[in-house]
Image: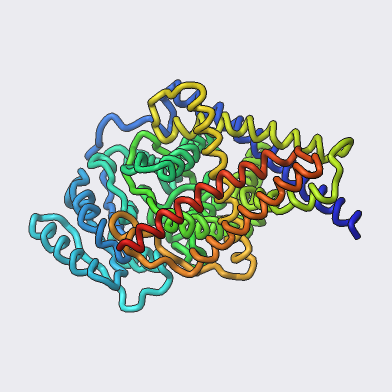
Amino acid sequence: MLVFLSYFAQAVFAVVVAYFALYVFLELRVLLISRKVERRKLSEVTQPSAGFEDSFSPPVSVLLPICNESAMVERLVDAACQLRYPAKALEILLLDDSSDDTSELAQAKVDQSAAQGTNIRLVQRQNCQGYKAGNLVNGIQLASGEFFAVFDADFVPPNDFLMKAMPCFKDPRLGFLQTGIGYENRDVSFLTRFQAMEMGHQQFITVGLSEDGDMASLSGSSCIWRRACVEALGGWNSTTVTEDVDLGYRAQIGDWKYAYLRDVVSMSVLPETVSAFRVQRERWGRGLIHSAFKHVREMLRQPMPLVKRLHAISMMFSSVLLASIYVLVLLSLPLNYLIDFDGSTVRWVAVGFFVLVAIWTLDNAFGARKGARFDQRPGVVRTLWDAYLYVAMFLPMSWYYFAGGIRALFGVYGDFHRTPKGEDEHRTIMPRINSMLLAGELFTFSYSLLAVLLALQKGNCFLMPLNVTVCVGFGMILYWSWQEGRARARG
């Protein structure tokens, strides 16, 4: 029995490392493409329009879905009302699913803006089913525009957003367009800097994916959709908690083109508390994993070159890869117990894994800093230390994605918890999943610490870097959780 468990654990370890190797190779390829685009500063997806053409001003409906966003709603409306576009072709719909005092603030702000001549109205539903997806589906039924510009509550688009983005839609096959996202509070803490870098890396990679014509996973905010595309796809789907990714996959599999304008940047706000961060990432992991398995069969049916198909698989299942890293964490203890690494093939697999991690760290950190627009250049030691902590944070994220994947496996697709931002973040009661994830963090930290002690006792130290890094990453999360708990206790 022990022999079977040993071979099984080794096989799983080898499969995850092999998948990670493919992912790293493909990401390096796209990173090189992104760097070429950045150097050139001229491509179909990043070149801004020289000016707005009055002859191309199709009706646009700006959709602003909100739910209990009292800290954000007024600045959101202000930003939407400042968008430059022919007035006769622009309408703004504030889609309000709130159950608190947000609705009063929203109504007052809409009335004030309407009195100043802006074509804006408040839309409220009697039955708020389907969360954000249901809110958007209801909104497009009331909208008159041929295009939908969507902004979440915490977004502030630049006033020339439509002027730069809309000329791209002269291409009739362009179904949707994504723009860059910046973060107002990225320097509040290491947690916010990590998030800005992690999502900045995704944006930088998307430059290469878009340039190469590969599938991409795009945000559902700071974007524009063609009505014909949305209606042809049946609209946003409320059976998944990542309705934006789901619709984007369906559009790309359905042969609609997309564009990515990294230089058109809307500002957003990141979660500042670790509770909001972990709940958000579990929801993202659950939705991304669900969407990947939901659409992979249809994607495989589409004719495409091998490299593009590999990129599609790598992108769609990157969330599964991150969740599988947590499986490696769980395997580290039995591997240390069952296997003598001297002369074992697992020894070389482990070495290969850490080499891949080092390569991925360098390219990921470079792309992250470029994508998040961090211009300062710290010293070598500080850069290496920051890169190590950056990588360590992906290990708690692997737990959140693993938990989300398990919940998706058991059919929990629609358990949606909004991410509070601003002042709302510090007074919102967190859902039960937050406590469950915290318990998992405590378990994983203790588990990896035990694996380190066992490795020292047996002299099997090849997996120790993984377990030490797990302790660092989860240790930071637990420390921030303790700080947050004290702050909430003080009121």
Quadrant that contains the N terminus: bottom right
- State which quadrant residue 466 falls in: top right
Question: In x, y percent, where is residue 159?
Answer: 23, 42
Q: Residue at x 56, y 30 (%)?
A: 363
Picture layout, residue 29 above or below residue 101: above
Residue 140 at least partly seen: no
Picture layout, residue 250 above or below residue 14: below
- Tell me how the rendering is colored: rainbow
Picture layout, residue 106 above or below residue 352: below
464 and 58: which is toward the camera:
464
Quadrant that contains the C terminus: bottom left
268 and 266: which is toward the camera:
268
Question: In x, y percent, where is residue 393?
Answer: 53, 44
Residue 90 relative to residue 306: left or right: left
Question: In x, y percent, where is residue 82?
Answer: 18, 47
Residue 294 relative to residue 487: left or right: right
78 and 488: which is toward the camera:
488
Question: In x, y percent, where is residue 353?
Answer: 71, 37
Residue 315 relative to residue 370: left or right: right
Q: Residue at x 60, y 70 (%)?
A: 411
Q: Residue at x 57, y 44 (%)?
A: 472
Residue 399 at least partly seen: yes
